[in-house]
Image (cartoon, coloured by chain):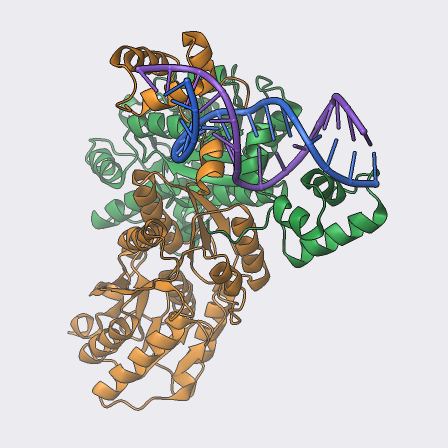
Chain colours: A green, B orange, C blue, D purple
Amino acid sequence: MGKKHISLKDIARELNISISTVSRALKNHPDVSSSVTEKVQALAKQWRYSPNPLAMGLLKQKSGTIGVIVPDLVSYFFSSVITGIENYSKDKGYSIVIATSQESYEKELECIENLLNLRVDGLLVCLSQHTSDYSHFNKVWDAEVPLVFFDRVCRTNDFSSVVADNVDAAKSIILHFYETGASRIAFIAGPAHLSITRERTAGYLKGLKACSLKPDNNLLVNIDLNLISATEATFKLLKLPNPPDAIFTINDTMAFAIMKEIKKHGLRIPEDIALIGFTDEFHATVVEPTLTSVMHPTYEMGQEAAHLLLSQIESLEPHFTKQVVMKTHLVVRESSMKVIKNL
Amino acid sequence: MGKKHISLKDIARELNISISTVSRALKNHPDVSSSVTEKVQALAKQWRYSPNPLAMGLLKQKSGTIGVIVPDLVSYFFSSVITGIENYSKDKGYSIVIATSQESYEKELECIENLLNLRVDGLLVCLSQHTSDYSHFNKVWDAEVPLVFFDRVCRTNDFSSVVADNVDAAKSIILHFYETGASRIAFIAGPAHLSITRERTAGYLKGLKACSLKPDNNLLVNIDLNLISATEATFKLLKLPNPPDAIFTINDTMAFAIMKEIKKHGLRIPEDIALIGFTDEFHATVVEPTLTSVMHPTYEMGQEAAHLLLSQIESLEPHFTKQVVMKTHLVVRESSMKVIKNL
DNA sequence: CTGAAAGCGCTAACAT
DNA sequence: ATGTTAGCGCTTTCAG
């Protein structure tokens, strides 16, 4: 850190006054004579004084940092949410410390531990896909550190959360598929315990029902969220005696892997198989065919989560909770337009 | 932060001993009787004692955090580098605070200011594309805060840096284009002041020379790094009386935008125009045709930058500098295989 | 109006 | 072998 940072002491010494007077002058305390206040503020400015956050943190028992835990940083969804978190927090005077669980339960434990030890003022968490035991959040609860989950959530009675309208989104996808001529609709979802899987599956089933389509267990598959599993799952679906004519999947990254596999089998998208993803990242517009996807307000989700967290931190009600659901909408592109293409 | 964190004081009170004894016992100081040491360590463990980093930071004048400034978080390149930084730093006991300049010079200034005020122990910076004045790094220099630039660098006499072998990479792309049948090779680069633009342009020119191709000013274009500019630049190139038969560009994101525009004009890739990007992100394998790109060791670059920075921090030689160049290699896919496709 | 002192959590030199 | 003290930078009583 060097010795190059100016402290109140330095200013006090230079001006031959006490540290407390400097401290007061800097905050325009009415007790301090205006001449002294002026001198102090001038020197502070000239010397670029800036309060030491470590000292302030120690005193106020608030570090001014919030911890963010995400499964990874390279997925567009997470990096975009973090961008929203970062911008909102910065404006409110908080800095963010990022930790990645790498989709591992054990690493998630470590992250929680590390960030609590760091004395973050609050936590923003998206669960790892392999987390199905949630007892490690007891520590957070006991430490009275406010926490807001986003996207992949748990224990929503204990903690606040921000999620997409997963049920509706999934349902409207099924309706769209049906309207554009599909009838054997598969869903390649994530691990069954994940909230996003559960909710989107509920929406998927609702959608099938609304279209009077019979659910087929072969068409609902839960996979580990990685490219290989997505590819394998697609392969199996295609080899079914009665393969699907449409596939909906849990995120765009999986969708790209699925798209690759479908093409590899010489099948046309959407004519032979329609495809829809979730998130709507930039690359949905550059693949061929362009990918229909659920527009997820990722940046806004980050802002909203940060907003919720900071209001909890500043209201000093660590255990106040609120559940926010964000509206999504389907962005229709080529990969789902069976009917139109067939005309 | 709650009152829920255990301090040495709490342990001392419980055990009826002094704070310093507790402190010593915890670090197995030989002066402390083994019975006391045992008792202290047992209680510390039971109560999950963890030293307060704010107090330690204040005492040691080291915050244990490093600041990372990137143009954005959503580009694969940056998020991947950060992943490398995060993993390396975590292992060494540092946490990272991320700030985004959003490709803006003014925001970059703010980030520097904020992070210095935060008392980060070091800085890892990738310049914003609109930064062409570098005087704000004087503050960093004066504060004796170690700084390592990565990818887009400046003032390499003053600060350490980690970059790709840009000249060689660009040159080998030109050779590859030439060997696969291209002769009018365009380069869509970033702003001219950026180090990556300058170096890759040098490699581009070297490559042309090596192939005895004449440089054509119409084929070397500098653009603002955004999708619209990339699209416009491509449009102009295609409308040239004598358009290019190959395009090399500064990163994969630009390449995707360019690919989209080329297809829009009904031209075939690579038959009519070959295309090569830089970074080699996952999506290069899902677009159609798959994109030839320079494999950039992004994760390793993050690790290397963090390694350099931490050794500077811990050697207490803030102004020691070292320049690291990382080897890249071309990953050939469909978008550049003119010859083979033509057979 | 201003200064001295205490305390946030911790360590290290200085007593005992 | 253990306790006391001072100090990292800051704010906030409490005394003048």
> Residue A143, percent across and down?
49, 18
Q: In this view of the protein, which residue sits in the foreground, A105 or B325?
A: B325
Q: Quadrant of residue B40?
A: top left
| Residue B216 against residue B166 in the figure, above or below | below
> Residue B274, percent across and down?
29, 72
Quadrant where the image shows the C terminus of chain B: bottom left
Q: In this view of the protein, which residue sits in the foreground, B234 or A319?
A: A319
| Residue A129 against residue A72 in the figure, above or below | above
Q: In this view of the protein, which residue sits in the foreground, D7 or A152?
A: D7
- How many tags in the picture? 0
Left or right relative to B137: residue A113: left
Quadrant where the image shows the N terminus of chain B: top right
The residue shown at (38%, 23%) is B23
The residue shown at (21%, 37%) is A232
- Asked whether residue A326 appears in the rendered view, the answer is no
The residue shown at (31%, 41%) is B92
- Asked whether residue B17 appears in the rendered view, the answer is yes
> Residue B264, percent across and down?
43, 67
> Residue B65, percent across and down?
43, 43
Q: In this view of the protein, which residue sits in the foreground, B181 or A207?
A: B181
